[in-house]
Amino acid sequence: DTKRKVTSAMAYPVFILIFLIGVIWGMFYYIIPMFAEVYADFNAGLPGPTVIAINISDFIVNNLFLAILIFIMAIVALFLVYLTDRGRYIMDTLKLRIPVIGGVITNSIMSKFSRTFSILMAAGVPIMDTMELTENVVQNAVVEGAVRKARVLVKEGYGVANAFRRTGEFPPTLLQMLATGEETGDMDKLLGKAAQFYEKLVDSVIDRLTSLIEPLLIVMMALVVGTIIIVIYLPIFDLGEAISQGFN
C-alpha cells in the first residue's frame, strides 16, 4: 500500500513533465519556425538567445527522425544500464538522493524492511534466513547490499543492531528499535511499530507533497514556456524600441 501511494504521488509530476516536454517540442517544431521566417524577411541581426532558439528549432525540424532516434536510444541505454548490477546500484543511489522524493523512497523502503522483518521474526524464522528473505523484498540495490553486508557481520558474531549500524544505510530510529528489540527479545513487535512509524511518515510527506507539487509544477511550466516566448519575441521588442527611437 505504501509503494502504491509513492507511485501515485510520483505519477502526476511525471505526467506534467511529459506534457511540458510535448509543449516545448511543439513550440520548437511549429511556432519558432513561423517566427524564424518572419525574422528572415527583416534581414536584420537577431539577439543571441533568439539565434540559439532558432538553431535548436532548425535542428529539430531538419533532423526530426534523428532527434527521435537519439531520444529512444537514450531511454534504451538507461534501461540496459539499469539491468547491470553496477548500473542498478548507481541509479538506485541517485533515487535515494533526490531532494524530498528520495526521503519518501527511503522511508518507504524502511517501512517494507521493518514489516517483512517483523512478520518473519514473529513466525519464528531464524535470523539469518529472515535477513536473506528481507534482502530480496526491499527492491533497492543500495539497501539490498547493506542487508547483505549486515548478514555477513551477524555471521561473524556481531549483534543484529550493530551489524545494521555498521552498514551506514539505516536511520537512527530503526537502529534504536532493532537494538531495543534485541535486548528485550521483542524485535518482531518493535519492528512492527517501526513499520507503522515509517508508513505514517510516508503518508504525511505525500499529503504535503500533493498539496505543494501542483502549484510548483505550474509555476515551473510557466517559467519555461514564458522564457521561450520572451526569447522568441525579443527581436520584436528590439524593433519596437528602434522604431520608437526613430520617431524621437
Image: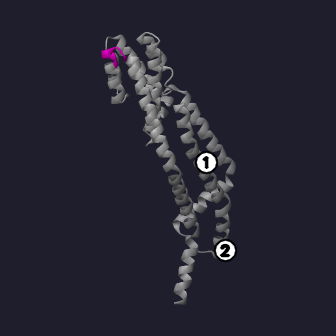
Q: Position of residue 245 (x, y in %)?
A: 52, 85
- How is the model colour-coded? one colour
Is residue 128 depicted above or below 214 in this figure? above
Q: Residue at x 61, y 36 (%)?
A: 76
Q: Position of residue 84 (x, y in %)?
A: 53, 27
Q: Nearer the viewer, residue 88 or 212?
A: 212
Amino acid type indicated by mark 2: Asp
Q: Which residues are magenta?
A: 181-186
Query: The N terminus is located in which quarter?
Result: top right
Instruction: Please indicate whether residue 39 sits to the left or right of residue 96 in the image.
Output: right
Separation of residues labelled 2 and 1 (CA atoms): 35 Å
Task: Judge depth for marks 2 and 1 and give the one in front.
Answer: 1
Instruction: Please indicate whether residue 33 sits to the left or right of residue 10 in the image.
Output: right
Is residue 56 depicted above or below 9 in this figure? below
Is residue 1 depicted above or below 122 in this figure? below
Circle 1 sits on which residue? 18
Magenta highlight: main SS: helix
Residue 188, picture quadrant:
top left
Q: Residue at x 33, y 11 (%)?
A: 156
Q: Position of residue 227 (x, y in %)?
A: 53, 62
222 within the magenta span = no
Dot 2: element: helix
Q: Nearer the viewer, residue 156 or 194?
A: 194
Q: Does residue 77 appear anywhere in the picture?
A: yes
Image mark count:
2
Q: Position of residue 38 (x, y in %)?
A: 66, 71
Q: Residue at x 60, y 57 (%)?
A: 56
Instruction: Please indicate whether residue 150 sits to the left or right of residue 135 in the image.
Output: left
Q: Residue 41: which disc?
A: 2
First of labels 2, 1 by sequence position: 1
